[in-house]
Amino acid sequence: MTRFRESQTMPLQRSRPAPERRVFCNRTLNLRSIRAIGFDMDYTLVHYDVRAWEARAYAHVQQRLLELGQPVAELVFDADRFARGLILDLERGNVVKANRFGYVTQATHGMRPLPHDEQRRCYSQVWVDLGEPRWVFLNTLFSLSEACLYAQLVDLLDQGALVGAFDYASLYRLVGRTMDAAHLEGRLKAEIIAEPERFVPLDDELPRALLDLQQAGKRLFLATNSEWHYTRAMMSWAFDRFLPKGGWRKLFELVIAQARKPGFFEGEAAVEELLDDAGSSTPVTGLRAGGAYRGGNAQMVQEYFGVAGEDILYVGDHVYADVHVSSSIRRWRTALVLRELEDEVRDEQAFAADAERLRRLMLDKEALEHEQATLRLALQRREHGAPVPDGSAQDPALIHERLRTLRVELDELDGRIAPLARRGSQLGHPHWGPLMRAGNDKSRLARQIERHADVYMSRVSNLLHLTPFGYLRAARGSLPHDSVQAAASDAT
């Protein structure tokens, strides 16, 4: 008889990641079936200190606007006023948050929050359709300085302080052109390259996560819109200290700079092979292992690896340019990186006990409101000589007395609910609340992620906990009538 050896048969006790470091699944994903994994760079493999980066981007655009004669010298970047997933309304000069159906739940005009009544007048008959030019979706953390500057310029436009003739739409075009020019000029990225320690926090788990994928047989590639010189500098800073000789280039079978996403996924752009660190290049018709390239297209990548679209996982931070287009056109599997999710999940964990208290108070309110509605129906039926609802009092005086008592009880209950609801509405962001929620509903951003990202996570190194052999199963979708079962459980 074979002797039992505990060390060979006991299961490995693997520690579970913190809730904010999990990989969250919209569509079941078996990593064992993925043969190639592509990565974006900015805010995906290389994270930035958002305040530091966006403050410098804002400063460069502000300087260019000053050179154009605009009175913006006194403006100051406010990093806490805006968030990814908001939407610019170029018709009204507003910044809005919408739910998954496109209904506006919060809004500011310029930097001024709109009161509920004013917001209702503006948007009660308006549905946010992101396919219309009126709306600009803030897809990425790179949008924060742009949103802040646009809102501040709206205020200046309303005051009649700007030089030139603008409406809210042409004002946005001015901001966009100026922002693009600041990036193309190169001084901003030169600052980042010169002092990466100011802008790029390191993640020592990230290289190990990518090595695990590579050593498990996954073929890795990098496809970024950033220029070659900037890509080299940022990847070297973020990776090389944690890797053996050869550094970050040894991780990736292909490296593509200036990919020009989202066009990369739908076009037939030519490709140039990069010959040296200075960026000298030569046109080529195909890709080779270990090569670095400028341009090209996703079809070339897919043909190089010799796999179907569903065998490729692409990881990025831009809801449209990284995951929407790659999934819709190429049928690649997709993962979205949302670094803000870490703080939001931590906030939700800390709020959990109060969230349960709020849920139970809302159940109590629902019961009192139902009783109130039933009593009002009883009075209406008595007035018209119809039978009153079962269980209702027959005496109108008793009904009126109970209704008065209910109003007092509901007012008291609302006083207990309001501070909890207010705290819950500020989780993740003090002005706009949770990234993935708009009131009690999913946000428009959550809807985009749900439709186009198979999985999402706060950082790429979260894959370390999943392992290259992980199997992610989507949660059972919730439906409004699921609450019936929850109510039954509460009753018992």
Image (tube, rainbow, N blue to C red):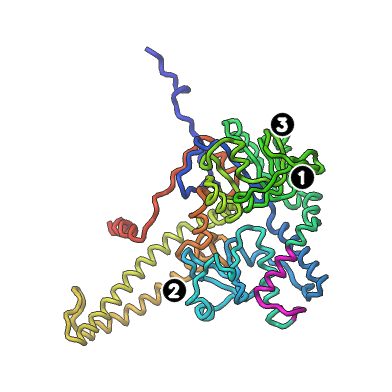
**Observer-nearest residue: 488 or 264?**
264
For label 2, the crowd category at 10 Å Cα-Cα, with few meaning under 14, some 14 to 19 and many 20 or more, is: few
Image vertical order of residue 400 relative to residue 1, above or below: below
176 part of magenta stretch? yes
Residue 235: give x, y in percent of width and height: 72, 43
Residue assigned mark 1: 233
For label 3, the crowd category at 10 Å Cα-Cα, with few meaning under 14, some 14 to 19 and many 20 or more, is: few
> Residue 252, labelled with which disc?
none
Distance Cα–Cα, label 2 vs label 3? 60 Å
What residue is shown at x 76% (from left), y 65% (from top)?
Answer: 61
Q: Is residue 420 visible?
A: no
Distance Cα–Cα, label 3 vs label 1? 17 Å
111 part of magenta stretch? no
Q: Earlier in the sequence, mark 3 or mark 1?
A: 1
Specify start and end residues of the magenta stretch as a single range.
161-179
Q: Earlier in the sequence, mark 1 or mark 2?
A: 1
| Magenta span main SS | helix
> Residue 415, labelled with which disc?
2
Distance Cα–Cα, label 1 vs label 2? 55 Å
Answer left or right for 253 relative to 408. Answer: right
User: Secondary structure beneath disc 1?
Assistant: helix
For label 1, the crowd category at 10 Å Cα-Cα, with few meaning under 14, some 14 to 19 and many 20 or more, is: some
Whether residues under marks 2 and 3 lie with C-beta atoms below 8 angstroms apart, the answer is no
